[in-house]
Image (cartoon, rainbow, N blue to C red):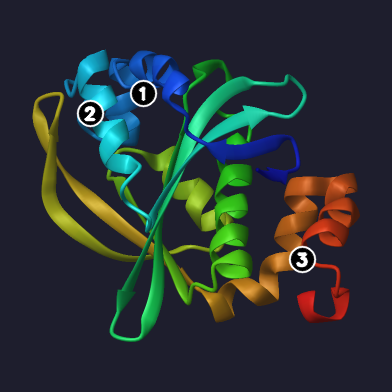
């Protein structure tokens, strides 16, 4: 498990499919997270997907839990490792399944946690993320974590009667590291020192 402030990352287990069944069939949630709101899935389909996920060692999928409420699943996150030339890239994504937590800053905390995993544990050179044009809340969260909009794919999603562009964002390791301490303090506040002692015992090397 990987703990970061108020949240905990753990692997998806088969019994977690009940959460995914509810979340992946929520029109509004999937409209923002995948831009495919009618992409309904039944439990049999999810079970087949789960079996495929278990075979993919480069694609990490996590259940996000609240540390304050043990085993209270609040969302999912994923991180897919790949190599372009000699550059190690981590494609990240997340959504908060409990919609009452939208707008609380939780998305930014999850994003910084994914950056910590990618850059500080998996030795990635860059991270990238994708978001549909109308998801301005996601764009602001990514940019607040240091991502930069690096491109757009035109008219890649058809949602609610019109076509939308897809936006690509990325951040390089050398861009993240100078801002890392400020981001950690903003996300973790009084828990920053506790986190650093656990995940970066050699504080001099952590900036």
Q: Are marks 1 and 3 in contact (CB under 8 Å)?
A: no
**In the figure, is residue 201 to the left or right of 81?**
right
Q: Are marks 2 and 1 in contact (CB under 8 Å)?
A: no
Q: Is residue 191 above or below residue 198?
A: above
Give SS at disc 2.
helix
Question: Which residue has dot 3 on it?
Answer: 181
Disc 2 versus disc 3: nearer the observer: 2
Question: Which residue has dot 1 on it?
Answer: 29
**In the figure, is residue 33 to the left or right of 10?**
left
Q: Residue at x 22, y 17 (%)?
A: 44
Question: In which quadrant of the rendered image does the N terminus lie?
Answer: top right
Give SS at disc 3.
helix
Q: Position of residue 68 (x, y in %)?
A: 77, 24
Q: Earlier in the sequence, mark 2 or mark 3?
A: 2
Q: Residue at x 39, y 70 (%)?
A: 89
Q: Are marks 2 and 3 in contact (CB under 8 Å)?
A: no
Q: Position of residue 7 (x, y in %)?
A: 68, 36
Q: Earlier in the sequence, mark 1 or mark 3?
A: 1
Question: In which quadrant of the rendered image does the C terminus lie?
Answer: bottom right
- For marks 2 and 1, give the CA distance: 22 Å
Q: Residue at x 38, y 81 (%)?
A: 87
Q: Earlier in the sequence, mark 2 or mark 1?
A: 1
Q: Is residue 207 visible?
A: no
Question: Which residue has dot 2 on it?
Answer: 48
Q: Which mark is residue 137?
A: none
**Foreground pick, 22 / 30:** 22
**Foreground pick, 50 / 162:** 50
How many dots with numbers? 3
């Amino acid at each position: 498990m990987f703990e970061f402030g108020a949240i905990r990352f753990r692997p998806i287990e088969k019994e977690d499919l009940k959460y995914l069944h509810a979340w992946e069939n929520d029109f509004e949630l999937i409209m923002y997270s995948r831009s495919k709101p009618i992409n309904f899935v039944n439990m049999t389909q999810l079970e087949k997907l789960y079996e495929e996920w278990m075979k993919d060692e480069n694609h990490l999928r996590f259940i996000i839990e609240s540390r304050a409420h043990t085993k209270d699943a609040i969302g999912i996150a994923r991180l897919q490792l790949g190599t372009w030339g000699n550059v190690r890239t981590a494609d990240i994504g997340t959504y908060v399944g409990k919609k009452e937590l939208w707008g609380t800053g939780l998305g930014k905390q999850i994003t910084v946690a994914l950056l910590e995993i990618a850059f500080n544990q998996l030795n990635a050179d860059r991270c990238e993320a994708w978001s549909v044009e109308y998801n301005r809340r996601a764009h602001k969260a990514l940019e607040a974590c240091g991502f930069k909009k690096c491109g757009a794919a035109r008219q890649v999603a058809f949602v609610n009667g019109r076509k939308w562009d897809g936006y690509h964002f990325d951040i390089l390791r050398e861009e993240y590291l100078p801002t890392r301490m400020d981001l950690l303090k903003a996300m973790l506040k009084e828990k920053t020192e506790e986190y650093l002692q656990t995940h970066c015992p050699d504080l001099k090397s952590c900036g």
